[in-house]
Amino acid sequence: MSAEAGSWFLVNASPDLPAQIEACPELQPRPHPRRNTPLAGVLLTNADLDHVLGLFCLREGGRLNLWASRAVRDTLDDCLGLTAVLEALCGTAWHEPPMAEFAPLAPAGSKSADLLCRAIDLGGAPPPFAKSERRCGRQSVAYQFTDRRTPHPGPLPQEREWQSVAYQFMDRQTGGRLLVAPDVGGLNEALLEALSSSDAVLFDGTFWSGDELQGVKPNAPEATEMGHLAIRDGSLGLLGKLAARRKIYIHINNTNPVLAPDSPERAAVESAGLVVGSDGLEFEL
């Protein structure tokens, strides 16, 4: 998303980020200066690998502006050594996402300062790779707290324990609001309020049904066990009633039948006034 030409914010950074940049001219460097990028920052919703591995592909540019809850940052540093790797290459500037009120993502004076954001707690748990003490040690914790460029003095506020968030953005000039929620395991009051107040919604469409994975893998967990509210069993009826002008399913798993244009599941989604997200989809608030 962007509030000005040449300055874009990403929500998560998937492993195929280089291919996405190659396919999107707006995300590619300008001719001058020699090293530059239109990417102003990345906002992480959680520590899932498919949301963060693309950060390593940005290591050859300038310092990365990253937004994440403290719990997400701790997981990425403890298990992947993310900050240590990036500090040795491009550098990082970590930011706590605003949790209650909207706040600008860029300093005053730039057009991007008109792009406001707030995070919404979705609960959740750490990703599977972070649940093994054998794989994730605590050796990087001292580095995080003593890094002179990103100090964290005093006690940690409660919001830093948030493992998964959604982001609601607001354009100060138009008043338009966008909600981005790729991992929704359940509904809460704050999320419902954000849904009702948004003009556009990008929502978790990972699974069509709660037991979808069991059709390809016996004893596979239910969708909610994996932190996802299934379309058929939870979100379709809710989103279909929203007044938002644009309602788009994203983060769709390759087992989800809505990916097939001629499927009855796709027809059900479209008849409810929703769109299945696709590469290259653009809209303005």
Image (tube, grey):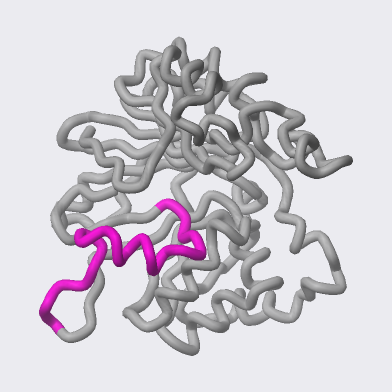
- Furthest toward the top, the residue is 241
**Which residue appears at 26% of the width and 58% of the height?**
24
Residue located 43% across and 32% down the image? 276
Q: Nearer the viewer, residue 14 or 126?
A: 14
**220 relative to 258 in the view: left or right:** right
Relative to 194, is 64 above or below? below
Q: Tell me: residue 178, above or below residue 165.
A: above
Extreme residue toward the left, this view: 32
Q: Position of residue 90 (x, y in %)?
A: 40, 83
Location of residue 37 by image quarter: bottom left
| Front residue of this view, candidates 220 and 54 | 220
**Which residue is found at the position 21% from the left and 36% from the top?**
284
Image position of 73 (left or right of 8): right
Residue 216 horizontal side relative to residue 81, left or right: right
Q: Is residue 155 above or below residue 164?
A: below
Residue range in magenta is 11-33
Q: Position of residue 281 (x, y in %)?
A: 30, 41
Residue 105: within the magenta?
Answer: no
Q: How many marks?
A: 0
Check the picture and name the quadrant holding the C terminus: top left
Q: Residue placed at 36% from the left, 14% from the top?
A: 243
Query: x%, y% of residue 23?
Result: 29, 60
- Decide if residue 156 is on the left or right side of residue 40: right
Residue furthest out toward the front = 262
Q: Which of these two is toward me, 150 or 225?
A: 225
Residue 54 vs residue 219, the one in the foreground: 219
Q: Is residue 23 within the magenta segment?
A: yes
Q: Quadrant of residue 77?
A: bottom right
